[in-house]
Image (spheres, rainbow, N blue to C red):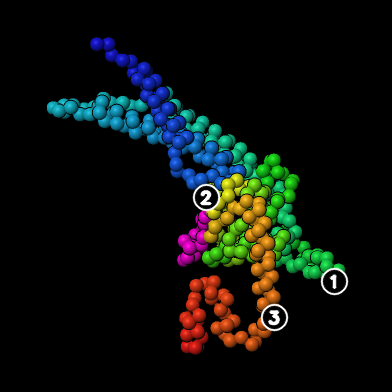
Amino acid sequence: MQQVPVSLWTLVAGIVVTAISIWIGQNHTLMPVQASLQAPLVDGFFNVMFTIAIALFLVVEGTIVVFLIQFRRRRGDDTDGVAIEGNLPLEVFWTAIPTVIVLLLGIYSVDVFNRMGGFDPAGHPHSAAHVAHMPGTAIAATLSDTSQATTAPSIAPTIGIGASPQTLNKPADLVVDVKGMQYAWLFNYPDSGITSGELHIPVGADVQLNLSAQDVIHSFWVPNFRLKQDALPGIPTELRFVATKPGTYPVVCAELCGGYHGSMRTQVIVHTPEEYNSWRTENQIAQKENLNQVVAVNPADLSTSEFLAPHTHDMGISAATLESVVMSH
């Protein structure tokens, strides 16, 4: 019986490994549903890395299994194994191949980062509204309603994910100021005056988040958008994206920020344009009514429990519990 050449076995094994790795790399379910324009770019890069990882795993582990079977010690064989001192071509091969793979992945990752807008903030200064939130800058309003800085702010390039090459030098459709604090996210809409504990955005809109932190470093992460950006105390950062699928998606702090870091969660709600306009109108009316109620009531006329009631209600504290605490003090 003619023995099959090793080169032919190697060719067949290479074809099988390639087919399996490509299929698994393109058909896995490891990632959540894509919900942003940037998500396919990240997933494409992840799928390439995962395909390569599967191929390397099969080659390494498959070789180990074959060697365990082929070169196992036979019963009664007490001789020494063959002395192998080295193989220069093999050493060069398994050093050169990973080097080439890493270089190509590095070039690919830079391209993805650029297409997502990662290179844009590096050369664009903060807007005036964003600088006004920076510590150490004082903005004084004059009688003519013009504003000028009493201390010249240090205008530094913004850090983060900015405009993509397609939207470069174009203003965002919606700008939201996001503040991270232990242990919550606060979203402020400068164009409408709305403040919310959830992020509401319209589908298809070019959204720009101006991120900042009140206390320690936080990290704003939306897994479905494949986007994550640190919120730094005193250093504004930016995150710009386009949501492509209506729905409700989790927002997670991905930076250990204290004892209750795990509970620092909220959600981003992607509306249709009609639903977003309705939400904005309703919240503008509601916040205006709340402001009128606050102005109409003199806090000095309220008891401690009445004054704290609106805040404790949002925190889930019952009126009876609040009253007992107040009475005890």
| Circle on res. 143 | 1
Q: CA distance from mark 1 to mark 3?
A: 27 Å
Q: Tell me where residue 46 appears, x and y as whole percent.
A: 50, 39
Rendered position, 269 above or below 166: below
Residue stretch in magenta: 249-265
User: What's the amino acid at mark 1?
Assistant: Leu
Residue 68 in the magenta stretch? The answer is no
Disc nearer the start of the sequence (1/3)? 1
User: What's the amino acid at mark 2?
Assistant: Pro
Rendered position, 23 above or below 217: above
Residue at the spot of label 2? 223
Q: Nearer the viewer, residue 280 or 240?
A: 280
Q: Is residue 159 visible?
A: no
- Quarter of the image where one finds residue 218: bottom right
Numbered disc in front, either 1 or 3: 3
Secondary structure beneath label 1? loop
| Circle on res. 296 | 3
Secondary structure beneath label 3? helix
Give the residue drawn at x 45%, y 31%. 22
Give the residue drawn at x 64%, y 84%. 299
